[in-house]
Image: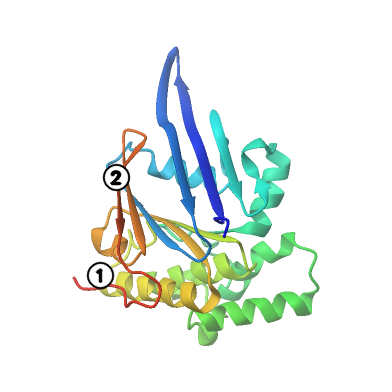
Amino acid sequence: MEPIVEVKNLSKTFRRGAEEINVLSSLSLNVPEGEFLALMGPSGSGKTTLLNLIAGLDTPTNGSIRVGKEMISTMGEAKLAKWRTRHVGFVFQFYHLLPVLTAYENVELPLLLLPLTAAERKKQVLTALELVGLSNRNTHRPGQLSGGQQQRVGIARAIVTDPTLIVADEPTGDLDSKSAEEILELLIILKGALNKTILMVTHDPRAASCAERCLHLEKGRLVSETYQNRPGQPANLAH
């Protein structure tokens, strides 16, 4: 079966004045559909750059990226923006919720860019909030929610469009250990229930241990690969 993500000979170079900085160098990887993949490495290793490229937030200098049947590495900015709206759900370290909007309204935001009726949007928002255990908090604003609850709203927003990929950049980085564990458990449950492909950047070995596979990057290259929790196996959430 074809992988859902196929990266071939990917390179990314940034310019800083006259200097060229190679952030990723000839990197290749495949991600099967429904896999929970963790990306680890020291600061500057290229893991967030790789995540951003796969999520269509940036374009490579060289190489190709295919997600599903779409070759996103050749898309222009406008087409990429449209593709992201439909195919990528984002989970951020600092939630990125709008403080003046309720949980319901924050989750609804990505759907406003899609051709849906108000009734269709309502059904999808309520389903997403129920999946993350926040049906009773849909009228609360972010300031009335704990950090863990805000991240649950962020996850509901990420899944509400039924995206091809969920990309999570340090999703537990701003949470206490108990809330972090609950968020990781939620991601595992959603992966199983919805068969979502999850790509997660993390510095936390405990968070990475919840993924099925962990890739370690250093200086823009993949240096090791660890298989951990295969489908059907319990994830290791021990401290």
72 left or right, relative to 141: right
Does 174 appear above or below 39? Answer: below
Give the residue at the far left of this rendering.
239
- Compute the Cα span from label 2 to label 1: 21 Å
Characterize the local packing of mark 2: few (<14), some (14-19) or many (20 or more) Cα atoms within 10 angstroms.
many
Rendering quarter of residue 230: bottom left
- Could you say which is closer to the camera, residue 167 or residue 214? 214
Determine the residue located farthest toward the top in the rendered image: 18
Tell me which corner region of the image, top left, top right, bottom left or bottom right, holds residue 74: top right
User: Residue at 42% of width from left, 44% of height from top?
Assistant: 48
**In this rendering, does residue 111 appear at all?**
yes
Please tell me which residue is depicted at 55% across the width and 74% down the height of the picture: 103
Query: Which residue bears the numbered disc 1?
Result: 177
Q: Position of residue 117 (x, y in %)?
A: 81, 73
Q: Which mark is residue 41?
A: 2
Q: Nearer the viewer, residue 60 or 81?
A: 60
Q: Are marks 2 and 1 in contact (CB under 8 Å)?
A: no
Q: Earlier in the sequence, mark 2 or mark 1?
A: 2
Q: Which SS class for mark 2?
A: loop
Q: Nearer the viewer, residue 146 or 54?
A: 54
Picture quarter with the C terminus: bottom left
Q: How many marks?
A: 2
Q: Residue furthest bottom?
A: 136
